[in-house]
Image (cartoon, grey):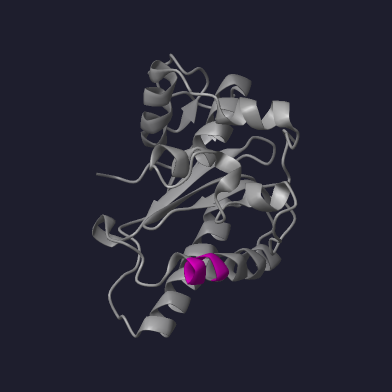
Amino acid sequence: MARKPLIRSNHLPYHVTSRAHNKELFPLPIKSIWEISNQCFQEAGSIHPIELVSFVLMDNHYHMLLFTPNANLDLFMYEFNKRFALKVQGQTGIINQIFGGRYKWCLIQSQQYLSNCYRYVYQNPVRAGVVRRCEDYNFSTLHATIGKSDFSIPIHDKFGFKDEYGLNWLNANIRDQELFSLKKSLSRSVLVNLKDNQKRKIT
């Protein structure tokens, strides 16, 4: 299957995900992978600046929301995943590939999709049964946003929900139809509407 051509934007956010090879667990404890992720954000971001909205690390994949002010998603992701893989290989001695393929992305052109995607990213550990609430998960930027930990680069959280009301909204269930669309969105280039099943182009 041919890789879809990148749609560049310097003002719209992207939803990006990448998964370990064969969907296996990353070959290091998740705390070590989290530290590697922090280093890679700092190093790759110093070369190709981004504005990170959210990031959640799971035991075999990650999700992130980010803006690329220089319309350079491909350049940043190349540096990020390359450094991630090299650091993991260096610490484990593994010579095989770390990721199962290239990262997947979708450009967000809908406020509805952005707010639901924001919740979808942070709810990953809740859906996996790791924690009961999003803010209880240590390996996400939400933990830093609410002041429970530090992160290596600034977090450009456009929502800023740190109080009880905001966290309750963040933890609220996403409707099944919207959840299905969010899961399928990474096979599209642009999602304008959660009910829209057609690929869209920026005009």
Q: Which residue is drawn at 39% across and 79% down?
A: 89
Is residue 86 among the parts visible in the rendering? yes
Q: Give me the residue at 36% from left, 30% from top.
A: 184
x and y percentages locating residue 141 in the rendered image: 63, 51
Please provide the residue range marked out in magenta. 31-35
Compare residues 148 and 47 and report the one nearer the observer.
148
Q: Left or right? Give the position of 135 relative to 178.
A: right
- The residue shown at (40%, 54%) is 61
Camera sees residue 8: no
Question: Residue sitting at 39 percent across and 72 percent down?
Answer: 28
Counting the numbered discs, the total is: 0
Specify the principal SS of the magenta part: helix
Relative placement, left or right, of 41 versus 121 is right
Residue 159 falls in image quadrant? top right
| Residue 33 magenta | yes
Q: Is residue 117 above or below residue 141?
A: above
Question: x%, y% of residue 124?
Answer: 45, 41
Where residue 64 appears, as percent x and y from the top left, is 54, 47
> Is residue 179 rendered to the left or right of residue 2?
right
Relative to 110, is 23 above or below?
A: below
Report whether 72 appears left or right of 15.
Answer: right
